[in-house]
Amino acid sequence: MRILSGIQPSGDMHLGNYLGAIKQWVNVQNPEAFYCVVDLHALTLEIAPEVLREQTLDCATTLLACGIDPEISAVFVQSHVAYHAQMSWLLECVASYGELSRMTQFKEKASRKEGYRVGLLTYPVLMAADILLYDAVEVPVGDDQRQHLELARNVAERFNARYGDTLTVPVGVQPAAAARVMDLQEPTRKMSKSISSPLGSILLLDDPSDIEKKIKKAVTDTENEVRYDPENKPGLSNLLEIFSNVTGESPSVIASRYSRYGDLKSDVATAVIEELTPIAKRYRELRPDVAALRSVIADGARRAADVAGPVYQRAANAMGLL
Ligand code: AMP
Ligand code: TRP
């Protein structure tokens, strides 16, 4: 099945990225899956050029270390396939200012900085271009991307209504549990690359002792009943969701086995350490071989361009470009 998803090379990858997105990518990978390191999206926020370059390689390595096999799926860097920026312009002439300025993520990010970059506003259009260029049927993403995905669907539908049936309308897919992993110190806020307390995020390359410490110190509540109740017990429910994603059991079933927070935390820590240790090991093996990595992403870009080129042409023709 044709799949596309993307991740920004804008900071250290964390447990939310893995459980909410990358793990799903591994599970659904197939020769028609395209996984993109979205370096153009990273330019919407301040990032030093040399940092962006390194983090793009870090990010591609993470995807491989998590289990994406480049012999099966294509792993590539967004800026290496020029159709993304070209398609984005076409879609900017389909999307409306109003719908972009209503995006929650835009409003949050724009409110943090005066003189924010225009790219922050048009960001979801570039994301729509990423998706629509591949005729993606499914887009595996975390819960925070739902609104952007809805925009991509609306843009595709509007394009088709205006210019004739041209673009495939995609659907977003979320994992059953941990589609929104919350910050361990502030469980009403999502775990994020940009704002997080040092103890709030579990990074994929954290040492087991740090993972254990962070989970043991995770903020819960003052009751002592283990129950899955995201509204009233966000911290505890977050731990249950993480555990559920890792083991496949439902959060409520897991909760029913525990009477003490400490016991649950200890088992969640063990499960997360078991899940992440092989990833960190693999990452450290792969990251030094930059030549091999570059060859993987060059191959990915070729495969991506083979699919994106004809779709771009279809869209350009439909709009009347000569
Ligand atoms: P980003 O780091 O914003 O590029 O996100 C890459 C992928 O990770 C997207 O599919 C996001 O939805 C997902 N993601 C980011 N943060 C979280 C989180 N806290 N919980 C679940 N998924 C997340
Ligand atoms: N906006 C997404 C995020 O921050 C990343 C992204 C860019 C993406 N293009 C995409 C995700 C295409 C899915 C499909 O998480």
Image (spheres, grey):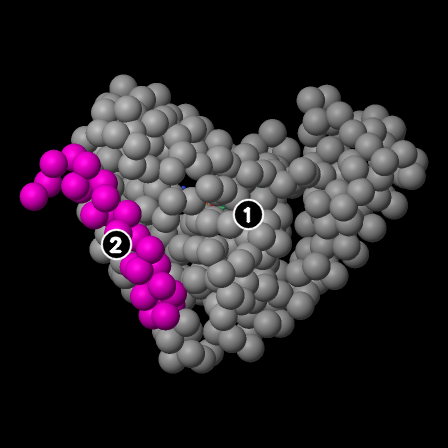
Q: Residue 252: give x, y in percent of width and height.
A: 82, 32
In this view, 292 is above or below 153: below
Residue 264 can be seen in this image: yes
Q: Quick one: label 2 or label 1, which is nearer the N terminus?
A: 1
Amino acid at dot 1: Ala
Reading the image, the residue beneath label 2 is 309
**Which element type, helix, strand or loop, lies under badge 2?**
helix
Q: Is residue 51 left or right of residue 203?
A: left
The amino acid type, in three-letter code, at marker 2 is Gly
Q: Is residue 27 above or below residue 261?
A: below
Q: Quadrant of residue 127?
A: top left
Hey, which residue is sitting farthest front in the picture? 165
Is residue 268 a member of the stretch shown in magenta? Answer: no
Seen at 38% across and 80% down, the residue is 291
Left of 267 or right of it: where is 193? left
Q: Quadrant of the C terminus?
A: top left
> Do the residues bearing badges 2 and 1 touch, measured as CB atoms within 8 Å?
no
Number of residues whose C-alpha sits closer than 10 Å to that of mark 1, classed few (under 14), some (14–19) or many (20 or more): many
Range shown magenta? 297-322
Question: CB of residue at label 1: within 8 Å of ligand 1?
Answer: yes
Principal secondary structure, stretch drawn in magenta: helix
Pick whichever, 315 or 147, lies toward us. 315
Residue 20 quadrant? top right
Q: Which numbered marker is on residue 21?
A: 1
Q: Quadrant of residue 78?
A: bottom left
